[in-house]
Image (cartoon, helix red, strand yellow):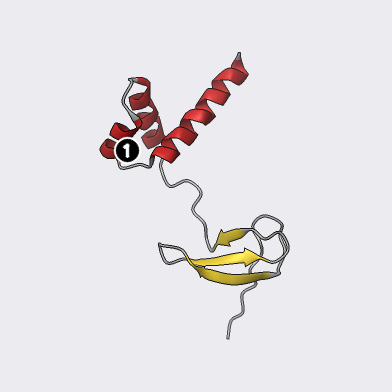
Amino acid sequence: MVTTTVHCTYCGSEDVVRNGRSPNGKQKYRCKECKRQSRENPTPHVYSEERREEILRASEERSSLRGIERTFGVSRTSVVGWLKKTLNGKLALR
């Protein structure tokens, strides 16, 4: 029998418990110390950098968020987050 130890991705504690499954079937865990939730083998960047650039260019051409959502099949909240990150980056360069 193989035993694997799961660590909290945020605080590094080993005091984690299973906490259901995510919609894509991955096991979710909750840390008892920092009370945060994480998944096994998380995938941090789902969209490639080229795809993100293409979507951001469409937003610069005055496409609506709902139009971008329908055309590219990406969530509006993701697009808004990307726009905020690029806006903060541009303001920092000034």
Name the foreground residue: 49 vs 78: 78
Question: Quick check: 15 left or right of 17?
Answer: right
Disc 1: which residue = 69
Which residue corresponds to the image point at 58% horizontal and 18% vertical from the top-left? Answer: 91
Secondary structure category for the residue under label 1: helix
- Mark 1: which amino acid? Glu
67, above or below 5, in the image: above
- Seen in the picture, residue 29 relative to 52 is either above or below; the reply is below
Where is residue 28? Give x, y as percent.
53, 66
Q: Quadrant of the C terminus?
A: top right
Quadrant position of the N terminus in the picture: bottom right
Tell me if mark 1 has few (under 14), some (14-19) or many (20+) residues whose alpha carbon lies within 10 angstroms of its own: some
Q: Who is closer to the viewer here, 54 or 25?
A: 25
Residue at 65% x, 72% y is 5
88 sits left or right of 45 in the view: right
**Residue 58, percent across and down?**
33, 26
Q: Position of residue 19 (x, y in %)?
A: 56, 69
Residue visible at 57% across and 25% down in the picture: 88
Left or right position of 35 against 21: right
- Would you identify the image quadrant in which residue 56 lies? top left
